[in-house]
């Protein structure tokens, strides 16, 4: 009788432990599943490069629609190999201005505020908002972002359909830190 009681008690412990373990796994299952899904946020779609070739070549172009970004945003991204200040990188507004790609758009720009330091992956740089005027971009604004790996600069220009480019900056920086741009940066920088 004693042996039978011991087996019943042992079986109860095993069933209880298995039920508890299953309960713990089931409680954590939704968080495991949701962490594997992509985070909610603006959807960037690659589009054709709209500018003629120049000394820097063809870049990458992306669009985020108003339904995802709150306004239409066009993002142009190019590498400027060997063109960055090798000693200080993109550490001030003058270097950011020198690297910016506003000449592609044939428009006049005026800084709306001082630039600020940013980080994209392992690279440091700056971001600065601009008002854009001219026949092609009247009433728009832009965010210029440049960051570097040693002497090589990567330059992003986000053209925004309203007059407040700082509002879109978190979305742009998040996209630049994503896997799409990381893969491109590694390829273009030869990493």
Image (cartoon, grey):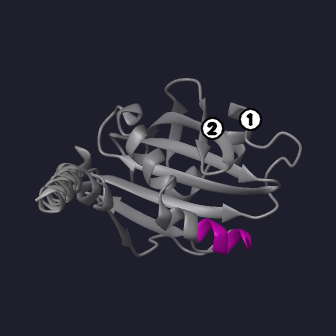
**What residue is shown with label 2?**
126
Q: Quadrant of the N terminus?
A: bottom left
Taking the image as shown, residue 125 lies to the left or right of residue 139, namely right
Q: Quadrant of residue 80?
A: bottom right
Magenta stretch: give its range.
184-191
Tell me where residue 78 appears, x and y as whole percent.
Answer: 60, 63
Q: Residue furthest top?
A: 113
**What residue is shown with label 1?**
91
| Sequence-first tag of 2 and 1 | 1
Q: Main secondary structure of the magenta part?
A: helix
The residue at the point 18 percent across, 49 percent down is 27
Examine the rendering and report whether any part of residue 55 can be seen.
Answer: no
Examine the rendering and report whether any part of residue 123 can be seen.
Answer: yes
Residue 131 included in the magenta stretch of the image: no
The residue at the point 19 percent across, 50 percent down is 20
Q: CA distance from mark 2 to mark 1?
A: 7 Å
Whether residues under marks 2 and 1 lie with C-beta atoms below 8 angstroms apart, the answer is yes
Tell me where residue 159 appears, x and y as whole percent.
Answer: 41, 49
Taking the image as shown, residue 109 lies to the left or right of residue 10, namely right
The residue at the point 41 percent across, 39 percent down is 170
Q: Quadrant of the C terminus?
A: bottom right
- Determine the secondary structure under disc 1: loop
- Determine the secondary structure under disc 2: strand
Q: Quadrant of residue 79?
A: bottom right
Nearer to me, 131 or 138: 131
Nearer to me, 146 or 109: 146
Which mark is on residue 175? none
Tell me where residue 163 appears, x and y as whole percent.
Answer: 34, 33
Disc 1 crowd rating (10 Å Cα; few below 14, some 14-19, many 20+) is many
Nearer to me, 89 or 159: 89
């Amino acid at each position: 009788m004693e042996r039978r009681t011991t087996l019943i008690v042992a079986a109860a412990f095993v069933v209880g432990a298995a039920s508890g373990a299953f309960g713990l796994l089931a409680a954590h299952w939704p968080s495991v599943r949701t962490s594997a899904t992509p985070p909610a946020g603006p959807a960037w779609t690659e589009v054709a490069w709209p500018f003629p070739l120049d000394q820097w070549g063809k870049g990458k172009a992306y669009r985020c629609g108003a339904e995802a970004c709150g306004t239409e945003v066009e993002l142009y991204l190019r590498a400027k190999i060997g063109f960055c200040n090798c000693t200080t990188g993109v550490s001030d507004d003058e270097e950011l201005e020198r690297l910016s790609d506003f000449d592609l758009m044939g428009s006049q720009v005026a800084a709306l505020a001082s630039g600020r330091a940013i980080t994209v992956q392992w690279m440091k740089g700056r971001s600065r908002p601009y008002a854009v005027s001219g026949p092609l971009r009247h009433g728009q604004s832009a965010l210029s972002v440049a960051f570097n790996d040693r002497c090589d600069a990567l330059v992003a220009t986000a053209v925004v359909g309203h007059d407040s480019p700082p509002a879109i900056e978190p979305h742009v920086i998040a996209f630049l830190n994503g896997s799409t741009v990381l893969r491109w940066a590694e390829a273009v920088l030869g990493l």
